[in-house]
Image: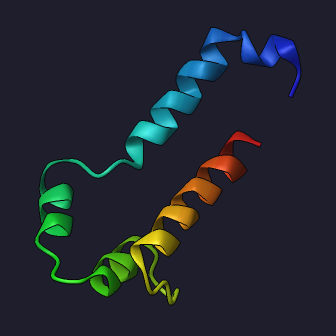
Amino acid sequence: MALTTVNDLDYIAARLHGRRSRLMEKERLDTLCRLHSVHELATALFPGTSLASSASIQQRLVQDLIDELH
């Protein structure tokens, strides 16, 4: 990524807006908080995957952020 891109406020604002739109807010967050197991949470966040632990969910979230920033 070029240094000029990092310093481009329009680019940074667009990235921030995109990330914010994917955050869980209000009713969506309430729904996630009512889930009864890690498996239900994994299925809600990443449909079609077989994440089995909270650590694997965290690893997936971190990897997704790394991929996005890369």
Q: Quadrant of residue 11?
A: top right
List x then y, in percent, for residue 28: 20, 59
List x then y, in percent, for residue 68: 67, 47
Q: Residue at x 56, y 27 (%)?
A: 14
List x then y, in percent, for residue 3: 85, 14
Q: Quadrant of residue 15?
A: top right
Image-based side of 50 in relation to 29, left or right:
right
In the picture shown, does residue 51 fall above or below 30? below
Q: How is the image coloured?
A: rainbow
In the picture shown, does residue 67 fall above or below 17? below
How many numbered discs?
Answer: 0
Q: Residue at x 46, y 75 (%)?
A: 46
Image-based side of 2 in relation to 9, left or right:
right
Q: Residue at x 74, y 17 (%)?
A: 6
List x then y, in percent, for residue 41: 31, 76
Q: Nearer the viewer, residue 54 or 10?
A: 54
Image-based side of 41 in relation to 64, left or right:
left
Q: In the rendered view of the protein, which quadrant contains the C terminus?
A: top right
Image-based side of 35 in relation to 57, left or right:
left
Q: In the rendered view of the protein, which quadrant contains the N terminus?
A: top right
Q: Residue at x 57, y 54 (%)?
A: 62
